[in-house]
Structure formats: C-alpha cells, structure tokens
Image: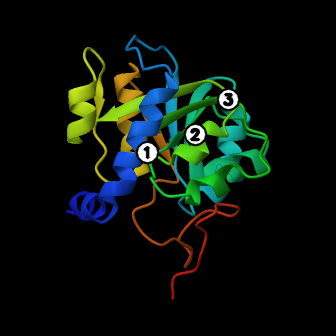
Amino acid sequence: KIQQISYKRNRELLRENFNKNIMLGDFTIQTKKQTKIACLVAAGPSLNETVFWLKKYQNDIDIYVVSTALKTLLAHDVYPKAVVISDANEITLQHFEKTGYKGQLYYLCTANYQSIIHHKGPRYILYQKGYELAEKHVKNVPLIDTGGSVGTVTFSLVEQLGYEKIVLFGQDLGFYGQHTHANFATSNGFFT
C-alpha cells in the first residue's frame, strides 16, 4: 500500500528520473554465486552498537549500505562495498555530502537523478519489478523487488547478486531507545 501511495504521489518525478537515468548508460547487475557474507546495513538505531562489529570484520564481509546510513559507517571508519539509493527525491543528496564516497553505487532507475550524476564511482542501475516503464525497458536483466523501502531494495539486490548468507544491521522494526535512526544518519530523530 505504501508503495502504491508513493507511486501516485511522485508519478511525474519517477518518470522524469527514469528518463534521465536510463540515458546514463550505467552498468546493470550480473548474478553469480558469492562466497562472502553480505551485510545489509540500514540506519536503525541499533547500528550505533553493531557498527563496531562491522568495523572489526569489514575485510571478511561485503557491506551494502542504504545511503542514509553511509555517514554512520564512515564516521566509524567502515567502508562499504556499495551504497544503495531508491528515493526519487533530492534528500539523497544529503546522504553523500562531505563524504568523498567513490565506491559502488546501486540505484533504482527512478531514484534521484541529481544524486546519481554527482557520484564519481562505478554506478549500477536497478530496474524495479512492478514499475511499468522499467519492465518494458529491460530484457535479460533481473528485476528488483522494492517493497517501498530502500532496505527491501538492498535485500533484493544482494539476493540477486548471488549471496546465500545475508546479515541485517540497523534494520530495526521498532524504536530503540526512543531513536528513529542511528547517529549521523541524515534521518535521525527522536520518537516522543
């Protein structure tokens, strides 16, 4: 339902981003068996505690982080394999401000165009299942389930990339300690 409401509210913005993003000629994903563990890192407040584990083991795992949690990881010297964005709005520009991040970026074909063109590293476009323009545009490219959340997009992505083991960090299902997000996350706030 959230996905349907979001689509209706942002229909023109999604279409505009889609038309611009497909012109970039970015890479698409390839599925192959992965041997490492994939860590999906979201911006839930539990990340404040689990980020230390990520720092300790970051060389042994592949870290895929939702863009709003990027600054939290970088503040702790944790460097992800990739960042994922799905939001069509300009809020995602803030997620990258003053980070210097140049690693892999995975983005939905309807994600904010400005955020994508400012990225100086490798970029991979993702086509979402259920978005008519995306489904018509691609052949032989996996479609990504979105579920209306960048966390769901990231989970679908790592699954499509061939990871058999996926561990979630900061993918909280409630408000932990009255916080809505991890420290340094651009969406951080308090629940009262």
Which one is nearer the viewer's eye here, 36 or 29?
A: 29
Residue drawn at x 29%, y 23% is 142
Q: Is residue 184 left or right of residue 36?
A: right
Task: Please name the residue shown 34% across and 47% down the image.
Answer: 15
Label 3 or label 2, whichever comes before in sequence order? 3
Q: Which mark is residue 116?
A: 2
Q: Nearer the viewer, mark 2 or mark 1?
A: 1
**Residue 17: image tag:** 1
In the rendered image, residue 151, in percent from the top left (x then y), is placed at: 42, 48
Q: Estimate how packed mark 1 is, as few (under 14), some (14 to 19) or many (20 or more) residues with alpha carbons within 10 Å.
A: many
Labels 3 & 2 near each other (Cβ < 8 A):
no
- Whether 189 is drawn above or below 115: the answer is below
Give 162 or 149, whichever is nearer the viewer: 149
Eye-nearest disc, 3 or 1:
1
155 vs 61, left or right, is left
Q: What kind of residue is marked 1?
A: Asn
Residue 116 location in percent, x, y?
58, 39
Q: Which residue is mark 3?
A: 103
Q: Name the kind of residue labelled 2 in the image.
A: Ile
SS at mark 1? helix
Write the residue at 43% across / 20% down.
28
Which three-letter amino acid code belongs to the residue tagged 3? Gly
Quick check: marks 2 and 1 in contact, CB under 8 Å?
no
